[in-house]
Image (cartoon, helix red, strand yellow):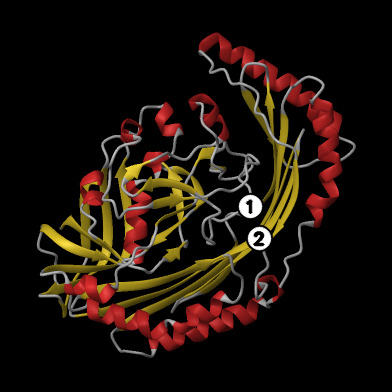
Amino acid sequence: MELKYSSYLTDIKEDLKVLIENLSKDFNFVSVLATDCTGKVYAVSRRTSAISANGSNERGFVVRVHNRVNYAEYSFNEISKDNIEEIASTIRKDLVQMTNKAKEVLELNQYEVIQEEEIKKVFEKPVKVNPRALNDEEVIKRLTGIMNRGLSQDEAIVDYRVRFEYLHVNKLYLSNNKELEQSYMWANGANICIASKDDKTKYSYKGFSGLKGGELLDEIEASVEIVVNNTLVLLDAEPMPPGEYEVICDPDVTGLIAHEAFGHGVEMDMFLKDRAKSKEYLGEYVASELTVMHDGAKGVEETSSYSFDDEGVLAQDTIIIQNGILKQGIADSLSALSLGVAPTGNGKRESYERKAYTRMTNTYFSPGKHKLEDMIASVEYGFLLEQSASGMEDPKNWGIQCMVNVAKEIKNGKLTGKIYSPVILTGYVPDLLKSISMVSEDLEMGGAGFCGKGYKEWVKVSCGGPYIKARVRLG
C-alpha cells in the first residue's frame, strides 16, 4: 500500500524555497530540513491497555547556513508567506550575534562551504498494511487476544505484555542545489512474557521490526508459544559460572556485539574529540579475516534505513571492517569536512530541534559460509548465546559489555538442554573479534530499539548479522 506523502510539506515547499533565496543573499550556503512524522503506540498488559502518540512525532524545520566562519542553525515550527521575511531577519540577527559572542570566548572551528551536487529525487517505500487505516479499538482488541493467548499457556505466567508502534516519516531537504523528499514507515513490536515459580521470576521477549506497517501484527501473533516456552525454561536456569568459553552468538547477540564493539567507536565525530581508540587502528587488523562489518542506511532494509540523512546526504552502505581490516569510520557532513573525508550519510538528529551528530544506522556483520549445526558440533564445551538484553562500550579503551538473557550449554558438540541466565559478556574488542572462527550463512536484522549519544540524542538504530563462533569471557 502506497504511503501518502505529507500534504503539509508539499504545501510549504515553495515558501521554504523563498526563504532559501532570501538567505542566500547573505550566506553562501543555505539548507532546510523539514519534517512531518506521525505515529502511535499501542500497549496491553494484564492490568491495562493504552494508546499514545509516538514519542518521535514531530513537525518543524531547521535551517543551516554558512556564516563565513563555520555553520550555524536555527529551528522553528511555523512558516507562511507572511512570516518568511521575519524568519530570515531573525536568522540574520541571532546567528550573527551568536557567532560574535562565541568568538569572544571560544576558538571557533572553521569550515569550508559544503559542495553539493545538483539532485532532485523523490523516495517512497510502500507497506502492505497502513496502520493509519486501522481502527484503534481493532488494534487493541487484537493485541489483547495475543496477550490472553500468552496468559493461558501456563499457570506460572504472571503477565504477558504486547506492544506495537509505528511512525510514518516524511522529510524534505532543500538547499541551493538539492531537492529531496522521502516517505516511509517503520514499525516495532514486542511480546514480553513474565513467569514466576518458587520465588524466582524470569522474563523473555521477542522483538519485531522493519520498514513495515500493520502487517507486523501477524509476526507478533505468530510468536506467542515460542516466547512462552523460552520464558518457562528460564525458571530452571542456573547462574553462569565465570570464565572464558567458546560461544556461538545468535544473530541478535551478534548484532549487539556489532553495535557495541564498532558503533560509537567508529563515529568519526568521536575521532575529533580523541574519544575513539579505533582512530589509531585504521588500516590494521582488528578482527579475524572472516569478519566483514557494515554500517549504512542503504545496505539492508530495517528501521534505520532511509534514502537521505538529516543533512541531505544520500544513504550509503559503508564497509567498516573488510576481512578483518578496519577500513573506515562513519561521518556526518561537518565531521567529514574537518577530517578531509567524504560524508557517509550518517548525520542524524533526534528531532529538527537538535544538532546533527554522526550516528549509527544499520550496523551488522556480513554472513559467511558455515552452517549452524556444524558450528555447534565444533564446540567441545561452551554455550549458544541467545536474546540480547542491553550493552555498553568504552570507545576510548575498546572495552565491551553485553547483557544476554540465555546461554544454552554445549558439550561435545551437542546442546545438553541446560540453561544459564542471566549472562554478562565482556572483553577487549580486538581480542573478541580476532577470536571469530566461524560465521554462519544466515543474516538476520533487528531494529526495535533506540540508541543515545551518551545519555541523550536518541535515534533509531538496527543491528544484526549471522551466527558467529568466538571466544569470550562470561559471568
Q: Residues within 10 Å of mark 2 (few under 14, many from 20)?
A: many
Q: Amino acid at mark 2?
A: Tyr
Disc marking residue 307:
1
User: Percent x, y for residue 23?
Assistant: 79, 26
Tell me if I can see residue 129 in this picture. yes
Quadrant of res 14? top right
For residue 123, above or below residue 52: above
The reply to whether the C-beta atoms of the residues labelled 1 and 2 are less than 8 Å apart is yes
* Residue at the image point whose x is 21% and y is 62% from the top: 423
Q: Nearer the viewer, mark 1 or mark 2?
A: 1
* Residue at the image point whose x is 41% and y is 66% from the top: 443
Q: Amino acid at mark 1?
A: Ser
Residue indicated by mark 2: 184
User: Percent x, y for residue 175?
Assistant: 74, 35
**Is 423 positioned to the left or the right of 215 in the image?**
left
Say whether disc 1 or disc 2 marks the residue closer to the N-terminus: 2
Point out the residue furthest to the right here. 82
